[in-house]
Image (tube, grey):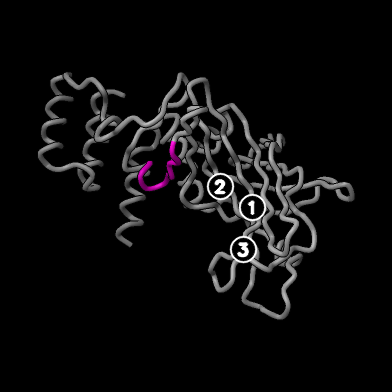
Amino acid sequence: MDKIEKLKELKSLFESSIISKEEFEQLKNEIINQNISTGISQLKEVEIAQNNTVNYTKTPISDYFIIENPRDRFSQTQTFWLKENISLESSMPNNYLIVAGNINYNANIELSIGIEINNSGFNLIFDLAIVIYNNNKRIDDKIQLLAPMLSNAKINFIIDEQLNVLTLDNCTSYRLSPYDSCAENAQVTLESVTIIEQLARARSIEYEVTYSTNDYNNQRTSQGLFKKQDILKVQAFYNSFFDANFETAKILSRINDISSS
């Protein structure tokens, strides 16, 4: 990052009330005098987890968007998740929802993005779940789906209306509750940063979720477009773990807009 870009980012941090006027003046002088060694992206950051590929640090962006789970003492693995799930458009779960005359219940398909980090590497996690709500409150009891909709799940993405399709098809975990409650969940994991980087750099993201069982193959569960705030979540996730300089000023500005609205 050159001197002008550093000064622009520093100004954005000051205008967003992330740093004080005194801190702004001090760092501005350091940049001008070429004495800054760590870059603005390291300001007020506390390193939490890192290896040769991932460097997660505590910043205003990660504070706002990321949940940290405690590090496991035996595996030395730490898991992080987006604080807010991405809701995927679909009427299908509601069509398969078994409810005795209560119209306040509805079922959503939700996507969360997480990452497991240890000393040797990382796993990105795309977690799909059927989530049941009653009067907009999430519930877990005495509701049932007529049929599973996330078995052998695949997630397809089209970025910026390009011809090529990005596919996540290595479903590593699937659960369907055998009891009265619906607890359907599927995880697709990968060890490459390529897809999350492409998603973060996208202007538009079209998605499709499909599933297959013994009776059905590649049935569509959900299809639609990411909303602007959902693309922002992906950008913040990528910034937090893979590139602390990525769209920092833009993301901080959006946090400030959201907080003041």
The residue at which mark 2 appears reads as: 112
Q: Is residue 209 magenta?
A: no
Q: Which mark is residue 249?
A: none
Measured in 3D between alpha carbons, the distance from the residue under mark 1 to the one under mark 3, in whole angstroms, is 12 Å
Question: Disc 2 to disc 3, how far (Cα)?
Answer: 18 Å
User: Quick check: 148 above or below 75?
Assistant: below
Identity, as a three-letter code, of the amino acid under mark 2: Ser
Residue 92 position in % (x across, y down): 73, 61
Count up the numbered dots. 3
**Element on which disc 3 rests:** loop
Which residue is found at the position 15% from the left and 31% from the top? 28
CA gap between label 1 and label 2 equals 8 Å
Which callout, 1 or 2, points at the residue further toward the start of the chain?
Answer: 2
Q: Amino acid at mark 3?
A: Asp
Callout 1: SS: strand
Mark earlier in primary sequence (2, 3): 2
Q: Is residue 41 left or right of residue 233?
A: left
- In the drawing, does residue 129 fall left or right of residue 13? right
- Which residue carries the number 1 mark? 129
Q: Quadrant of residue 123?
A: top right
Residue 140's label in the rendered image is: 3
* Residue 1 image point, x, y percent: 31, 24
| Mark whose residue sits in front, 1 or 3 | 3
Q: Where is 193 relative to 185, above or below?
A: above
Q: Secondary structure at mark 2?
A: strand
* CB atoms of marks 1 and 2 within 8 Å: yes
Q: Report which quarter residue 126 is drawn in.
A: top right
Residue furthest to the right: 215
Question: At 23% from the left edge and 44% from the top edge, which residue is drawn?
Answer: 18
Question: Residue 199's spot in the image, x, y percent?
Answer: 55, 38
Q: Which residues are magenta?
A: 62-70
